[in-house]
Amino acid sequence: MQVAVRRPRRLTGTITPPGDKSISHRAVIFNAIAEGEARINNYGPGADCQSTLRVLRSLGTQIDSNGSSLMVQGGTLQEPIDILNTGNSGTTTRLMAGVLAGQSFLSVMTGDRSIRSRPMGRIVDPLRLMGAQVDGRDGGKLAPLIFRGGTLHGIEYRLPVASAQLKSALLLAGLFAEGDTVLAQPALSRDHTELMFRAMGAEVTEDGLTVSVKPARLRAIDVTIPADISSAAYWLVAAVCHPDAELTVMGVGTNPTRTGILDALQAMGADLSIINERIEGGEQVADIIARSSRLHSIEVAGDLIPRLVDEVPILALAACFAEGTTVICDAAELRVKESDRLQATSKELTRMGASVEELSDGLRITGGHTLTGARGRSYGDHRIAMTLGIAGLLASGETTIAAADAASISYPSFWDDLASLAEGVKS
Ligand code: S3P
């Protein structure tokens, strides 16, 4: 699917982004291995979240869906009769690796081309240290992955990357292990697993950057998923960079391990009002109003990166509209996401007239160049597709985006939402 986007004269309206992808995966996986039955409301509609449902159903979990509501029957997983296919979803692959490592049956898991090129050694190595019998292509570095069970024992382990997927995989394996699993993180990554484990009765302790879990059988709980801040980010950047805009984004999850994008935009001078802050289902939620703003450059590095890891492409677009030079570094992880996002962001925004230089671990963006519509491509990556859609809302002339349907990995209604806010969008 190709989409064409033009800059609207005004950009106003109210948007409710879809249910958070990270929390959705966790709610259904954790309830599938828990004791009892649970309802999940506002489950993420994207293809990645559907991949998790497919994998769990292949493992014998009964999941009934009614729109965005799911009923999950927790219980014992069974040996699957075929290869488990995780599609494009890194979170499904990594979190399920932690679950499968702790089962007594054989399973094989693979995904699409992108998944088969993403690093899995970071998961396989510590799972083997825990006693799991795991194999994979290239000595266990790449999917397909094979799990043959094994008796797991807890380990003390220093995570080589600040990855919530890795942390969650090991915490999940730790539930099935003997003894404590103790993980030292290089920086804090999203903590949805820790919060939900606790709510489901597991003993999770945190001491600075160290997180530990004791073996446990989780208890099923109902979960209502907040709107995804990673999806909200596109509208916030659209509004603050457009000269005549006010957008309200409703019910956004504002867990502090995810709000790096709000901190970065506010540090750039963005006019954001965070209102109606509340706690829903153990997670912080708020409505956010974003208005046209005069932005200036900042430096983005270190501990902030894991708090906005999926928002780097859209933050780079915001930096194109900021006065001065914004430097994003310590972000080498972006090279091993659904695409090499540093390269894709730099290439595609440069094609539109921006000054975006690729660094080995980040981007250097000099603002103040106006963007001109161009023919862009998504690299099959949802975050690149949506970043280019917003770039099209801010550029002169027409921007076309090839393979724009990649957005449906996390946000299937993205192009409809964009069309509802701005005239001049055709697919
Ligand atoms: C996720 C963690 C992040 C993020 C991904 C979802 C999660 O990956 O990029 O989209 O749900 O745990 P890493 O933690 O591996 O960086």
Image: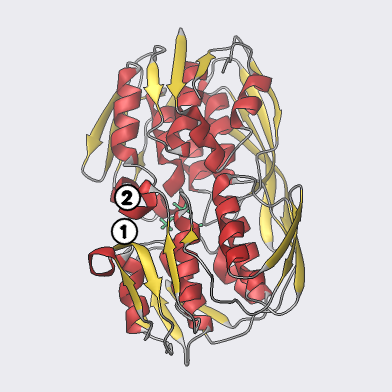
Numbered circles on residues, count: 2
Outermost residue toward the bottom?
Answer: 179
The answer to whether 208 is drawn above or below residue 248 in the figure is: below
Report the residue at 59% width, 86% height from top. Answer: 216
Q: Which residue is mark 1?
A: 119
* Kind of residue at disc 1: Pro
**With 316 as the anchor, is 50 left or right in this view?**
right
Circles 2 and 1 in contact, beta carbons < 8 Å:
yes
Query: Where does residue 417 sit, x and y in percent of width and height?
Result: 65, 27
SS of the residue at dot 1? loop
- In the picture, which quadrant includes the C terminus? top right
Query: Where does residue 97 sit, x and y in percent of width and height?
Result: 45, 69
* Kind of residue at disc 2: Val
- Residue 143: image quadrant is bottom left
Report the residue at 68% width, 21% height from top. Answer: 420
Instruction: Classify mark 1: residues with Cα within 10 Å, few (<14), some (14-19) or many (20+).
Output: some
Question: Gap in Å between the C-alphas at discs 2 and 1?
Answer: 7 Å
Report the residue at 37% width, 36% height from top. Answer: 298
Q: Which mark is residue 336?
A: 2
The foreground one among 421 and 364 is 421
